Amino acid sequence: MTVTLADVAARAQVSPATVSRVLNGNYPVAASTRERVLRAVDELDYVLNGPASALAAATSDLVGILVNDVADPFFGIMASAIQSEIGGPGGRAGGERLAVVCNTGGSPERELTYLTLLQRQRAAAVVLTGGAVENGAHAEAMGAKLRKLGAAGTRVVLCGRPPAPDAVALAFDNHGGGQRLTEHLIELGHRRLGYIAGPEERTTTRHRLEGHREALAAAGVKDDPRLTVHGRYDRRAGYEATLELLRRDPSLTAIVAANDTVALGACAALRDSGLRIPEDVSVAGFDDLPFAIDAVPALTTVRLPLSEAGARAGRIAMGREEPPPGGIATVPGELMVRGSTGAPRA
Amino acid sequence: MTVTLADVAARAQVSPATVSRVLNGNYPVAASTRERVLRAVDELDYVLNGPASALAAATSDLVGILVNDVADPFFGIMASAIQSEIGGPGGRAGGERLAVVCNTGGSPERELTYLTLLQRQRAAAVVLTGGAVENGAHAEAMGAKLRKLGAAGTRVVLCGRPPAPDAVALAFDNHGGGQRLTEHLIELGHRRLGYIAGPEERTTTRHRLEGHREALAAAGVKDDPRLTVHGRYDRRAGYEATLELLRRDPSLTAIVAANDTVALGACAALRDSGLRIPEDVSVAGFDDLPFAIDAVPALTTVRLPLSEAGARAGRIAMGREEPPPGGIATVPGELMVRGSTGAPRA
DNA sequence: CTGTTAGCGCCTTCAT
DNA sequence: ATGAAGGCGCTAACAG
């Protein structure tokens, strides 16, 4: 029924092994023979059987990419960049590798489940993106799983995620970025700053928040715990948290959001409350997603090189670039000062 | 070295066949036996070999998703929704299916290449998203490829893509949406409308543009060809096209953009030109991506139910929902009137 | 450079 | 309800 390698071999009058060699191109084959084989492949419209090939060779052309949610540009951009680097020569059968994108929704259980599924597929590599959940038990389970993957020959790379044993890590400098952002606001003269943080248990949330607090402390600004509100990393959380912050302290002059999406929600809440940005309240985000520049006024934020980091993670995962020394690199963020922040009202 | 099914069988003191049956759960096994097997699996930390399993069973747990670029929320949202529906029971070994996301960049060649790669993987299903390129030769090659996939047992679903033979299609009503949008502007009193279209050869571009022209014709507004500019589906194209349109006709009072991203670029260009929205020039987009509502003023656009359509495509691809009658359904868009459109200046 | 020979690890009739 | 046996399609030594 379906055409197999043996059929091709018969038609080209060579052995199956030779056909395999031509297809994989990792072995010398006479030009004339190759020609004949390729013609037979074409005539028979033969398509290699991936599973069979993977079974025999004990490797596959699949690369796993774990994200919270591809619908979120933060992850979509990284996934896209990773993917752009996993193709190319070096692999089996044409060097084309497929990206398996897994939406974990940030759930530790799903992360583990997907890693097992990728292990089952004998994935060539796995890239985990975004912050991790802080939970001892889970961290341990995760570490064990990553170790097993590594032992099975799957390269593991963390992208925008804090370092972990047994994995190469490209970590974003969330701490430093958060710090510089708040320093910027303090320099502008702000003293009453509201902070809309992400979910409590995530590393990203904690690091950005710690940077913020450090900047406050360094400037001798007292950190009023009532001015920090936690919520999810989405627009609605930003909207509601802003209303809450305004309720708690109508005199605040700036709002720092966990990320750009949250910041947009904050802007909407401020507008709906009749407050001008930045005349009445300054707003800052984090990430510098594409839409940040189109906010009105344009959003002051910390630019993370998502695309560059993703591409690099992809290359490392493919063994096309050396891992950073010690297996860990910190990717800095860049403060982007735009129109949404200004001097506080008098 | 690596634990195999036989190892599990030995430890549980049953035959490999029994272990297989327990793992796949599609065959009666005594509760006590199952118990023993599962314990052995656990103790040995056994992980099924996907390729071997796929080879023997002649099916895989992979589902292909073709997109232009996951970094674009338009595609990211659909990919995310599709993915959310491909898991669940019904499949092999736990029913978890993996999504293989393929960035085609809109290139016909890459589309074909990825389809071959998915065919090679014996993918359980493939969902193609977004508009198609209009090109006879390519359409034919594509049709042939889809037919082969279908013949090999891979379910093929088109999502937000015009119908094609041998595939179930959920098509967006780009034509109708484009038409209603322009009708809206005409009703507001606009007569000089600039149109920023997408790339020439794409179905999405053509359908939206035709809807626009039809609305113009119906209202007896002459369609000045100089007021239509083609460009890519990105912000920069919108920016540049807007400057070009303003150059060609400074008297225009409205700009209709190919999509929301392009519309943001248009807004930026207008602001930079010192023009107010909508007092001087109205702007409209298409898609209603999440950021559209946060534009200032909020963007009038046509809402496409990307998430709903993606979810439905995913269910159909998994055989969990009946395909629409005739294999074709048209998904309507909804006109969202917001602040970026208003009456033309006097 | 090419053919021969064994599996890779699992599923699935066919018996029992 | 369980076991035995063959083969899924390909690759990787090993010869030649």
Image (cartoon, coloured by chain):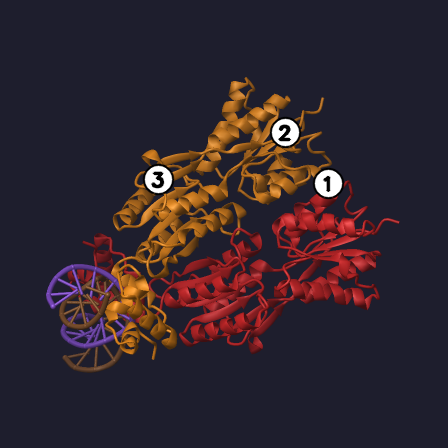
Chain colours: A orange, B red, C brown, D purple
Relative image position of residue B184 (x, y in whole percent) = 78, 59
- Mark 2 vs mark 3: same chain? yes
Marks 1 & 2, CB-CB < 8 Å contact: no
User: In the rendered image, which residue does mark 3 sit on?
Assistant: A323
Quadrant assignment, res B222 = bottom right
**Disc 2 to disc 3, C-alpha distance:** 40 Å
Quadrant placement of the N terminus of chain B: bottom left
Under mark 1, the amino acid is Asp
Residue B272 badge: 1
In screen coordinates, is B330 left or right of A155?
A: right
Residue occupying image coordinates x 68% and y 37%: A297
Residue occupying image coordinates x 34% and y 75%: A40
Residue A108 appears in view: no
Under mark 2, the amino acid is Ala
Residue nearer the viewer, A56 or A237? A56
Residue A254 badge: 2
Please say if A29 is above or below A40. above
